[in-house]
Amino acid sequence: MANKGNRRAKIVGTDIELDITEKKDVVIESHDDDHGHDDHHPKETFITKYIFSIDHKMISKQYLITGLIMGIVGIAMSLLFRLQLAWPEESFGIFDVLLGKWATDGVMDPNVYLALVTIHGTIMVFFVLTAGLSGTFSNLLIPLQIGARDMASGFLNMISYWLFFISSALMIASLFVEAGPAAAGWTIYPPLSALPQAQPGSAAGMTLWLVSMAFFIASSLLAALNYIVTVLNLRTKGMTMTRLPLTVWAFLVTAIIGVVSFPVLLSAALLLIMDRSFGTSFFLSDIFIQGEVLHYQGGSPVLFEHLFWFLGHPEVYIVLLPALGIASEVIATNARKPIFGYRAMVGSILAIAFLSTIVWGHHMFVTGMNPFLGSVFTFTTLLIAIPSAVKAFNYITTIWKGNIQFNPAMLFAIGLVSTFITGGLTGIILGDSALDINLHDTYFVVAHFHLVMGISALYGLFAGVYHWYPRMFGRMMNKTLGYVHFWITAISAYGVFFPMHFIGMAGLPRRYYTNTNFPYFDDVANINVIITLFALLAGAAQIIFLYNFINSMYYGKKAEQNPWKSNTLEWTAPIKHIHGNWPGKIPHVFRWAYDYSKPGSKEDFVPQNVPLKKGEKELQH
Amino acid sequence: MTILLVLTSLILISIAVWQLTKILELSKPADYDDSEIASDKDNDMQGKLMFLFLIFIYALTIFSFYQWGDVMLPESASVHGENYDNLLWFSFAVIFFVQTITQALLHYFAFKYRGNKKRKALFFADSTFLEGVWTIIPTIALAGLILYGLFTWVDIMTIEENDDALVVELYAQQFNWKARYAGEDGVLGDANVRFLQDFDGKNLVGIDPTDRNGDDDIVVQELHLPVNREVVFRIRSQDVLHSAYMPHFRAQMNAVPGMINQFAFIPNVTTQEMRLRPEIVEKVRKINKIRFDKSEDLVASGDFPLDPYEFDFLLLCNKICGASHYNMQMKIIVETEEEFNRWLDDQPTFKEFVQ
């Protein structure tokens, strides 16, 4: 057993060495020997294949399935609190079943409402859209699309998944502690999150939240370093940076943003742990609570807000950029057209990444931060609209005069562009410090960020799953169910979040347990009912997806090697999953990834590993 | 009961959709193309649906404005509120224009260029001109918005020294607001949470008893403001973050323990005047109708009916602060200078209150 393990490690080691030693022909010959016959591989046990796997394809599936399970929890929570918002303080049997002692006679307790909102946000942002989306597709696509046999370090990759798993388990465990899970909002601003006296969720629930996030951050840092090293060092021959598919560009830049900003959240979490447990005063000062003056002196909650949003805002782009990368790939493939303005797309990704790290203050215009600083952040924030606009227009131009194949992935990619525009535009309102005064923390904000990062990124996740399902599972998903899934989701997503702008404009604050406790907002109660009905419909549509996802794994039609007639390298690898991705030589790359419908070629696509014909110009790069 | 019905019908609808797709699957004709890759027929169908979806987006927009346009932005009642509203509507006009055009292009192209076997896409990879156009135009538009926005922001946030201004402290705690007026001397006494327990808890906002400036301070639970006079708020919190949000005055500032934040505005409409405005009359009528209908149900089930609603300005808490966050508000009454002074004279000073 030990021997086999050693041998296996050695093979992986050799592969990497081969990839970085400029691939002399002689060396590649030996590759054939290594990977030509399956029986050369050590036999994998169940544990090494499915649990502690170091194969990037298996790890990507682990990320996806963990992410989907967390997604079910997160979305189910949102449906619960939407029921409460539409029919405040009514008794529901489902509350009784799911919330138990926290819903006496089936009526939701205000503390539980806050807990649900908090954990919904945390799970969706970090566990579903960061790990589930970026983790899944970075792992699957980076090695396959750049022509590498695996990640730079398969072992680190395995560790990063299992840290994510521990973090997920802790977050779920926190739902079961006596006083309930964290309930201070997903932004966990102290002092509310620091003092158990302030709300029950700030006791053991908050501790578990912080520990879970510490694991999560460690996981995403290890993963990000691995992605960066892999993209920079393990590209196959001919895969220059300007020939990288936009997906890989997006994953690379996402990883860089993560490395820059996640450590700051870790420091915020650690300081908060110190304040909570060791009596320090980083974020606390002059507090009187429950009839007692606390000893904290000299700290500032605003400091925490700075540290939190230094990650929190780039996090939006950590969520969104992979989705946009996936959309670029899916739109180009299905429009049968080159992505329009490749260089501008890369430039926009870089510009967005750079700007994303200097705009965090727009979450803090009315926190007491110096108004002059507010002006600076308004300026940088609105600048982000420029690269975003370039991206949106480039997508639109890509489908112009295309030959659009409406596979389910394409529908979700177009849906993504639509919600990205709708949600992005209201960002121009909120990024303006003056206008933020009256809209800050209202439902207008909720509507804005759900459309621009929540729904858009979820669409990116769905587009990715529909598009690469054949690559991951060797079978096709049912397209009819995919169509039904998309249309119900698309209509209900707008049905939920479009009306929400109106109640936000009316001045309705977010995170209110009920909006009818005093009469002023009685006239928006009917809007809340409509929103909830659409939310329930959207939730039901996801059941179709889950059914399709699981059913197709076993009964789906067997996939051909390149079902979407795509150019990128992952479709040149055989369907059968082998460690090392390609049985023989790693394909070399001779062109960019977007030679669709190129004049002079017979087919409407030319994969990247096809050499240029005589006299053919590489038009783009 | 209605909820149960709604839920049941939702579940039934989803089951129906599921079953329908099953039936469709089973009733395929023999020559049916069962590939899971979009066929020409799929492309045609989905392309047309894309166009319908564009109509859906427009219809939803128009419906929402028609149906809920009236709740959108409450009537402004402060001097800078008017500038705020102008900036807001100007920005909205810009984004609506862009939204209408880009959604049309996106969905129309998706519809127009739906694929089929005969068609070949145009190989069009790059155009410096086009990219220049949609880099420069947004840049110009945003430059305009940024400048306009920043002028408004600086205008709102600059608090100039003004001896006539009324200084009011807003004091937040889980889960209520208090207000403190500076009294005759116009100076708020020093305060800190350490003094809260003095005088058997009668020191409601923690005024330092050794600071003579605090003696004539007046602590109240209902905020009264004189019309057309600048009010400078000093905002404090004793426990967690809160946010003083006064939507009618286009005003918001967080209350942060350990810090004193500031915000200033000039209210320019009294509560009485506001109640007579047609928009407010209409709003009150609408709300009272809702409450009346609800009351009928309540009375039928043996409960007390709801009180009728009368318009008042509100100060809401707008930063999550715990279980009763949703119920932390204070009434604001804007009145004439004389009415205000009369009211203020009736309130006990700190010194009178604690004795």
Image (spheres, rainbow, N blue to C red):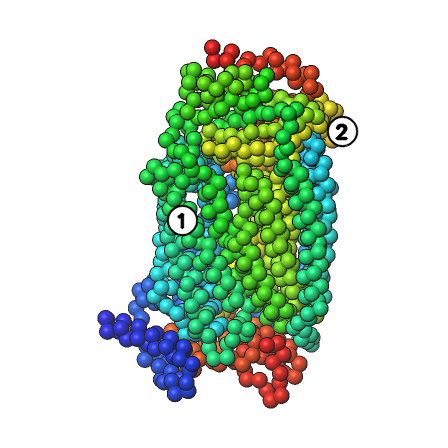
Q: Against A294, is A423 above or below?
A: below
Which numbered disc, 2 or 1, marks the residue closer to the eye? Answer: 1
Q: Residue at x 51, y 11 (%)?
A: B352
The CA distance from mark 2 to mark 1 is 54 Å
Query: Visible in this render: residue A499?
Result: no
Q: Position of residue B68 (x, y in %)?
A: 69, 39
Give x and y (percent) for residue A66. Answer: 42, 56
Residue at x-position 52% and y-position 32%: B260
Q: Residue at x 64, y 25 (%)?
A: B163
* Percent coordinates x, y for residue B141 in the rendering: 71, 54
**Label 2 residue SS:** helix
Task: Locate the N terminus of chain A by quadrant.
Answer: bottom left
For mark 1, name the chain.
Answer: A
Task: Give the number of the disc on residue A405.
Answer: none
Most distant residue in the bottom direction:
A614
- The front one of A442 and B288 is A442
Type of residue at label 1?
Ser
Q: Residue at x 40, y 49 (%)?
A: A267
Q: Quadrant of the C terminus of chain A?
A: bottom right
SS class of the residue under badge 1?
A: helix
Q: For mark 2, does the 10 Å Cα neighbourhood hold few (<14), some (14 to 19), or many (20 or more) residues?
A: few
Which quadrant of the structure image shows residue A413? bottom right
Which residue bears the numbered disc 1? A267
Can you tell which mark lies on residue B278?
A: 2
**Which amino acid type corresponds to the residue marked 2 in the rendered image?**
Pro
Mark 2, chain letter? B
Give the left or right position of residue B53, taking residue A123 as reference: right
Q: Nearer the viewer, residue B295 or B124?
A: B124
Outermost left residue? A2
